[in-house]
Image (tube, grey):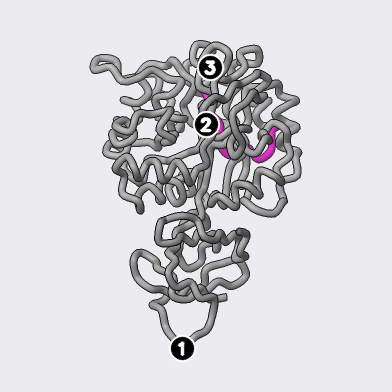
Amino acid sequence: MILKNVLFEGRPTDITVESGKITAIAPASAAASGEDCTGLSVIPGLVDMHAHGCVGKDTMDGEFAEMCEFLGKNGTTSWLPTTMTQSFEAIKAVTEGKTDVPGTNILGFHMEGPYINEKRKGAQNGKFIRNPDLDEFRRLPGMRVVTIAPELEGSMEFIRECGALVCIGHTDADYDTCIRAIEAGANCLTHTFNAMPGIHHRNPGPIGAAVTKNIYVQAITDGLHLHPSVVLMLYKMFGPDRMVIISDSMRATGLGDGTYEFGGQDITVRDGVARTADGAIAGSTSTLWRCVKQAHSFGVPFADAVKMASQTPADMIGAPEKGRIAVGADADLILLDKDLEISRVMIGGEFFA
């Protein structure tokens, strides 16, 4: 298949797709026939490394078909279903769910909790919080990313030995503890500023440590979790190669206001904002694509906003075939109309939506 006359980086281009891969990228030519994409532009499919659910479904349900269909139609072509702070048995059941379903590719799992700080648990269920346990974690197949609080007993050994990408989050750790965690191997902050100490000029905390060590930072750019000026601040500090846009989406994404279950707790969504009974923000109701557009509306250049939700998370989790338009990459693509709205989505070389 050849995508003809599609705008790629502002230039009319022909993109050849074979066996699910991009095999050629060339200036548009009348010599070859193909799928006419005149008037459309192309960007890489999005990669969401931190999402809990959508359309009434949750990762903890262990049923991914409906979520992968919805995410695919909305431009997320790869994701890491993200678990909640729950029992070992409940998390293990998620990893045993059927992941080979149509739509968005599942690249593994992100375990957010239970190795977190009670004080910064946010919408996580405190009943199941516990210290890092290497033996337990090693019995959970497919865990590509894990979020922990590095101040907990056993954290440094866990970071060094767990074999997954470790993110610092739901933490009350100080700057020095975070520096030690990063030197042990942690390489990202989970939903930066949320569920962690902020920056103080004499106590810079996790965010100051991330600046010092130039690690990755996740950010929920839905306009609720972070003020637009803070989104811009993170962008200017870390740039498009180190800042990762995430959705942190939950069951209500794609639906409406109401009461939903989230991590064993009732969550109320009102005017699109999800909160626990005690008022803590409980994930988002935004798609990753909406977060990209919001970041752009806050002043982030569009190309960089896209990169922070595609190539950068793919690079961070070690998926070099995802999140980019390049020869040899997977043919996961989004075609946009002149208003930068999604027209069609391609996953693995096949049009999905």
- Image check: 28 left or right of 202? right
- Which is closer to the viewer, label 1 or label 3? 1
Q: Nearer the viewer, residue 179 or 144?
A: 144
Which amino acid is tagged 2? Ser
Residue for point 38% across, 36% down: 215
Assign a secondary structure to mark 3: loop
> Residue 172 magenta-drawn?
no
Asked if residue 129 shows in the view, the reply is yes
Name the residue tied to disc 3: 121
Residue 127 location (% of width, % of height): 65, 12
Q: What range is drawn magenta here?
A: 139-148
- Which is closer to the viewer, label 2 or label 1? 2
In the rendered structure, which disc, 3 or 2, sits on the residue that comes first in sequence? 3
In the rendered structure, which disc, 1 or 3, sits on the residue that comes first in sequence? 1
Residue 207 location (% of width, % of height): 35, 26
- Image check: 196 left or right of 228? right
Query: Residues under labels 3 and 2: Cα distance?
Result: 16 Å
Task: Kindly identify which numbered label has been placed on residue 284.
Answer: 2
Which amino acid is tagged 3? Lys
Name the residue tied to disc 1: 31
Residue 6 location (% of width, % of height): 44, 70
Q: Residues within 10 Å of mark 3 (few under 14, many from 20)?
A: many
